Image: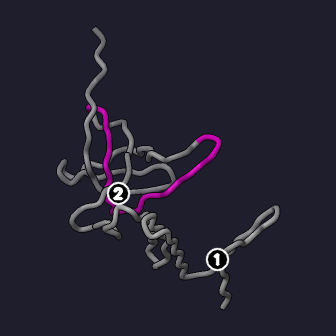
Amino acid sequence: MRVTGGVSYKQGIVAESRPGFARVRFDDLDGLVTAWLPVIQPKTFLDKAVWTLDVGEQVACVLDEYMESGCILGAVYSDVDTPPVSSADKIHLRFVDGTSMEYDRAGHKMLIHCIGDIKISADGHMALTAARIDLN
């Protein structure tokens, strides 16, 4: 018989963070802090994506039975940190400085609001097409 070990799901708070990895603190375990755990990303091989977790962010983890190895599934909302939208038809991204991007698939509208500068560049041709374009 082969023993594969136990796996557990646990929520904790990010104690330290760097791109692609974080250490998680579990207050219910006397403040135990994990080793560096990988954070699940949508792409990591040919195409790459990374979103670094903030220290203090609540996260969901899957850990081995000794809590020595595992991964961070992602950040989770709570009663204190609630989702920024209530509509299931919206995808929303908001940054701490107030910059935001939102798409409402029911209303067919996209809103991008940037607090700072925006730079768009292309190595090839760029085309801008719309029924009406207002420049201010």
Residue named by callout 2: 15
What type is the residue that disc 1 sits on? Answer: Ile
Residue at the image position 30 percent from the left and 33 percent from the top = 64
Front residue of 2 and 109: 109
Residue furthest to the bottom in view is: 136
Q: In this view, does 73 lie above or below 100?
A: above
Magenta stretch in the rendered image: 45-65
Say which quadrant the N terminus sits in.
top left
Spatial separation of the CA atoms under disc 2 and disc 1: 32 Å
The residue lying at 76 percent from left, 69 percent from top is 127
Q: Is residue 4 above or below residue 27?
A: above
Residue for badge 1? 118
Q: Which of 13 and 123 is in front in this view?
A: 123
Residue at 26%, 31% in the rendered image: 65
Residue occupying image coordinates x 26% and y 50%:
11
Badge nearest the viewer, 2 or 1:
1
Q: Which element carries disc 1, helix, strand or loop?
A: loop
**Image coordinates for residue 43, horizontal then vertical, percent:** 55, 45
